Image (tube, rainbow, N blue to C red):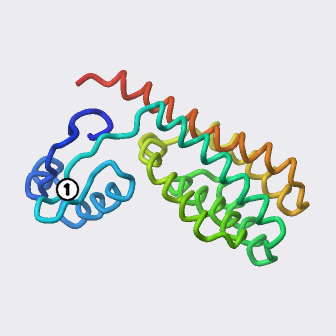
Amino acid sequence: MILMGDKLAGTRLVLFDLEKEMKLGRGPIREALIKLDRTGLIKNIPYKGAIVANPPTRKEISYIFDIRIDLEVKLAIEALSHINEEQINELESLYTQMKNPGPNYYSLDRKFHNTIYDASGLSHLCMVVKKLIQSVETFLILYPQEKNVCLKFNEEHGRILEAVKAKNAEELKTVLAKNIKGGLEIIEKSFQKMMRIPN
């Protein structure tokens, strides 16, 4: 509703009103508000409650992805020197699970990437990456991804996994950057779908 303009910036999100409007219980709504606060789409202000913030613009999202590519590639390259067998096994398990795309595909995708970045040992920069992703992930999960898109990502994940195992820094840089840019393409499609939806 926020991304589609049904809830404008500055609008107060009152639990009682949202329960009636969405026909949902208070628990799921509270959980959604907490998640939205992390993305920056809403702000929880003491004594006022939740208020809709301005979503990131296309230009801002483009800059976020530029920063993501630079930082995430650096973390992945750093991880090559530190990643252990347990983390490699975790990556292989996640890659196998993603071969059958389901509703938890996005969650598995994030775990796959975070497993690599966490192996870098640069925990503060990993937190920066997670915050950057939170600021755009609502766009990424707004619409279910088509199977062919998931299959394309899986092919890239397979190449990322092989590059990590082979400690091939050049291949890792190339395919990881391509994979992250794929997320920006999904957001562009999300914008296009939103613009087609009548008010």
Q: Is residue 25 above or below residue 121?
A: above
Q: Nearer the viewer, residue 77 or 186?
A: 77
Q: Residues within 10 Å of mark 1 (few under 14, many from 20)?
A: many
Q: Position of residue 48 (x, y in %)?
A: 12, 59
Q: Position of residue 186 (x, y in %)?
A: 54, 35
Residue at (80% x, 76% y) in the render: 84
Q: Is residue 170 above or below residue 88?
A: above
Q: Is residue 22 left or right of residue 60?
A: left
Q: Position of residue 177 (x, y in %)?
A: 71, 43
Disc tally is 1
Residue at (66% x, 69% y) in the render: 122
Q: Position of residue 63 (x, y in %)?
A: 54, 38
Q: Is residue 16 left or right of residue 176?
A: left
Residue at (61% x, 40% y) in the render: 66
Where is mark 1, residue-wise? 50
Residue at (46% x, 46% y) in the render: 136
Q: Is residue 134 left or right of residue 69?
A: left
**Kind of residue at badge 1:** Ala
Q: Nearer the viewer, residue 107 or 97?
A: 107
Task: Identify the image quadrant of the C terminus.
Answer: top left
Task: Identify the image quadrant of the N terminus.
Answer: top left
Label 1 secondary element: strand
Q: Is residue 96 left or right of residue 168?
A: left
